Image: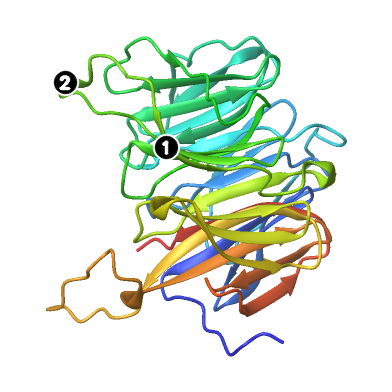
Amino acid sequence: MANHFSFPSGFHLLIATHKRVFSWSHDGLVPVFRSATNGILAARQSGDGRGILAIADSQIVILQNVRPGMSREYKLKGEDGELRVLQFSSDSRTLFFTSTLSNAVQTYSIDYSRFLEPAQTHPSPPTVVATSSNSELLLVASDSPPTISIQNLSTRSAPLEFLPLASLSRVVCASFHPSHSTTFILGFADGTLAVYRIPTTSGWLALRPPSEIGRYERLHKASMGGIVAAEFIYGYDARVVSVGRDGKCRLVDFGRGTVMLRTWHISGPATSLSVLPVPKLSPPRRRHRRDADTEWKVLIAIGREDGKVLIFNTIGLLEREVKVGAGVFGLQWVEDGP
């Protein structure tokens, strides 16, 4: 039974299914995009308040502004297609996406409405894309053979090809720390989760190989589908929440010797994850201590294969749930515009 819950003021949760995209907030569950077919293969919204929604099918990417009460319908060509990668930079000025025509991540400038130089070409189509909190670093992973590249977008120096020791299997998810721009997570197909930090150098003329902070092997059962997604918990150096197709949510602290803090079941295979930190105390004269969990409430949104979206707190208590009627493949907490 879910507890009494109020959506955080100024935020909504974007929920993506193959047929519709919803905005879930204190206004309820509102569709903002529809496909006449099950053609939606990726959906992301800009995080800068402009309300730009990016939708991809198997061939094209559509950009549209999300406004209250507006829901457009398109006949997209993506039925039975594989999910595509679609990712805004942290400052929402650049959109990264994959294409069936290239093994390089395509780069599109939102500000100038034009394509930029694509990222490094991989030996197979990229499957994972992540950008740092300052929008300077781009991490791209592909499957065959397992390949990871990291590029500094501000200097456009040669990408660093990274071979992690934590696992030889392919990367299935990646995410950067929300406030430490050189710290990131990698989730592997064998169920291993590892945290890394890139050493910083003066001038950033060349990236140095990341160092491993910690790893947790077989965190999720590979035989049941392994890890689906993982994100950092705001306010901690290396505390991570992960979900898997084994129906479990795990909370692990890699900053204190890789300690499993908590596990809870979500009663079905997970498909997606999004984490939102909400300040508990916000008097104008009070300065937030960002390393103090007493001043932050973290909301963990998890999408399930059966079409349910669940919102938990960090102790595993269910705060709210909703059924959207179709399998959820993407979630994203988004700040509302002015």
Residue 333 position in % (x across, y down): 51, 59
The residue sitting at 22% across, 70% down in the picture is: 288
The residue sitting at 44% across, 59% down in the picture is: 233
Residue 52 position in % (x across, y down): 49, 47
Q: Earlier in the sequence, mark 2 or mark 1?
A: 1
Work out whether residue 5 or residue 192 is closer to the camera in this orientation and state it.
192
Foreground: disc 2 or disc 1: 2
Q: Residue furthest left?
A: 285
Q: Quadrant of residue 56?
A: top right
Work out whether residue 148 or residue 334 is closer to the camera in this orientation and state it.
148
Res. 89 mark: 1
Q: Amino acid at mark 2?
A: Gly
What colour scheme has been applied to the protein in the rendered image? rainbow
Say above or below: 302 vs 97: below
Residue 37 position in % (x across, y down): 85, 44
Q: Amino acid at mark 1?
A: Ser
The residue sitting at 57% across, 28% down in the picture is: 97
- Alpha carbon of mark 2 to alpha carbon of mark 1: how far? 22 Å
Q: Residue furthest bottom?
A: 4
The residue singled out by tag 2 in the image is: 203
Say above or below: 316 vs 106: below
The answer to whether the residues at label 2 and label 1 have Cβ atoms under 8 Å apart is: no
Q: Secondary structure at mark 1?
A: loop
